[in-house]
Amino acid sequence: MKINGTHYRSVWPIGEDAFGIIDQTRLPHELATLTLRNAEAAAHAILTMQTRGAPLIGAVGAYGLALAVREDPSDDNLTKVHDMLAETRPTAINLRWALKRMRDALLNQPREARAALAWKEAAAIADEDVAMSQAIGRNGLKIIRELADKKAGQKKDKTVNILTHCNAGWLATVDYGTALAPIYLAHDDGIPLHVWVDETRPRNQGASLTAFELGSHGVDHTILADNAGGHFMQAGEVDMVIVGTDRVTANGDVANKIGTYLKALAAKDNDVPFYVALPSSTIDWTLDSGRNIPIEERSPDEVLKMAGRLPDGSVTVVEIAAPGSGAANPGFDVTPARLVTGFITERGTCAATPEGLRSLFPK
C-alpha cells in the first residue's frame, strides 16, 4: 500500500542475507524500519510485536528460518530454529503453517542447496500472501457493493458503514490485508463508505494501526472506544462488521483479538452481518472446536501502561491504572461459528460451517 505516495510492503528482502520490516511499535507517531539479519532477531520482532498480524508473522518466520539455514543448513539446526520460531506466538496458525512449509521444502534437499531454496521459498510465501489478500479484497468487495446497492435502492444514505476490530490491513499481512482489503477496493471503486475503528485495547492496534492505514489511503473513518460498537449497532449506524482472524477451526469457530466475541454478540442481537476475512492458510483442520485453541496470555503491562505522544512531540510510556493493581491480559478470544455470517477467503465466500469450509476445497 502507499504512504504519502510511496509503496510499502510489511516485509521485504534486503539482498540475500537480511530482510526489512516496519517497526509497528513506533506507529502511528513514527514510520521506522528495522533490518533483521538472523532468526533470533526475527523471533524478537515477533515476540515484541514489532511485527504482528497472523499472515505477516508467517512470512517473517519464513525469512527468519531462511537466514538460519544460510548459517547452518543441517537438519538439527533446521528443526531447532523451526521450533524456536513456532513458540513465539501460540495462537496464530499461519506462523506454524509457514514454518512447516519451509521445513518440508528443505528437509529432503542437499545441504549445499538449502540456503538458496529457503530464500526462494520465503519470497514465494510473501508473494502468495499478497495475491491471497488481493483475492480476499475482490471477494469482499462484492458484499460491500451489494450493501451499497441495497441502501441506494431504499433511498437511504448511500454510505456503507463498516465496523472493524484490531488491525487486519496491510500491516497485518505482506500487503493489502484481510478485513481491510475489501474496504480499500471499495473505496478505490468509488463506493461511499465509512469505517468505525475499534480502538482495540490494550495495545490499541485499531487506533494506532488501522486508523493510520485508513488515513494514509484516504478512507473516511472514526475511532471508537471498544465498548461503543454495540451502541452504534443499536442506532442503525453499522451496516456490517468485518474482522480478521488468527485461527479458524474445522467447525468454523474463530480466534481473533480479544473483544471480537463481544462485537459478534452485539452484531447478532442487532441483525448486523458479521464477516471474517482470512486466507485459507488460517484454517486449522486439526482442531474441531475453538475450545481447543491455545490463547496467548500477554504481559499485564500492556493493560497497566500506555504509550503516547507528549505536546513536545516526544513519545513516552505512562502508567494508567491504580498503583498496586494486577491485570489479566488474554490476547485473543473465540467467537463461535453460530455468530459468524460468513467467511471471506481468497477461494471465495462460504458459510461458517464445516460444510462451508470444505466447499472451498472442491476435489
Image (cartoon, rainbow, N blue to C red):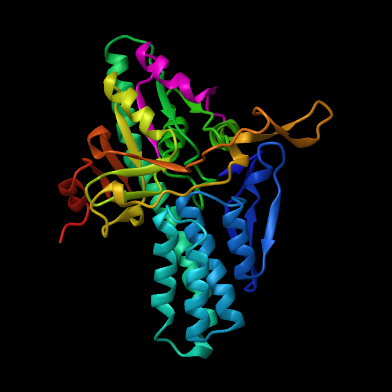
Q: Is residue 77 visible?
A: yes
Q: Percent x, y for residue 135?
A: 36, 48
Q: Residue at x 46, y 71 (%)?
A: 121
Quadrant holding the N terminus = top right
Q: Nearer the viewer, residue 56 or 259?
A: 259
Give the image location of residue 113, x and y in percent. 50, 87
Whether residue 235 is in magenta: the answer is yes
Depth check: give the residue in front, 283 or 154: 283
Q: Residue at x 58, y 45 (%)?
A: 299
Left or right: where 311 falls relative to 280: right
Q: In the shown orientation, is residue 333 left or right of residue 74? A: left
Q: Nearer the viewer, residue 1 or 223?
A: 223
**Residue 282 lies within the magenta run:** no
Q: Position of residue 306 (x, y in %)?
A: 66, 34
Q: Nearer the viewer, residue 318 or 77?
A: 318
Residue at image location 39% in from the left, 19% down from the top: 230
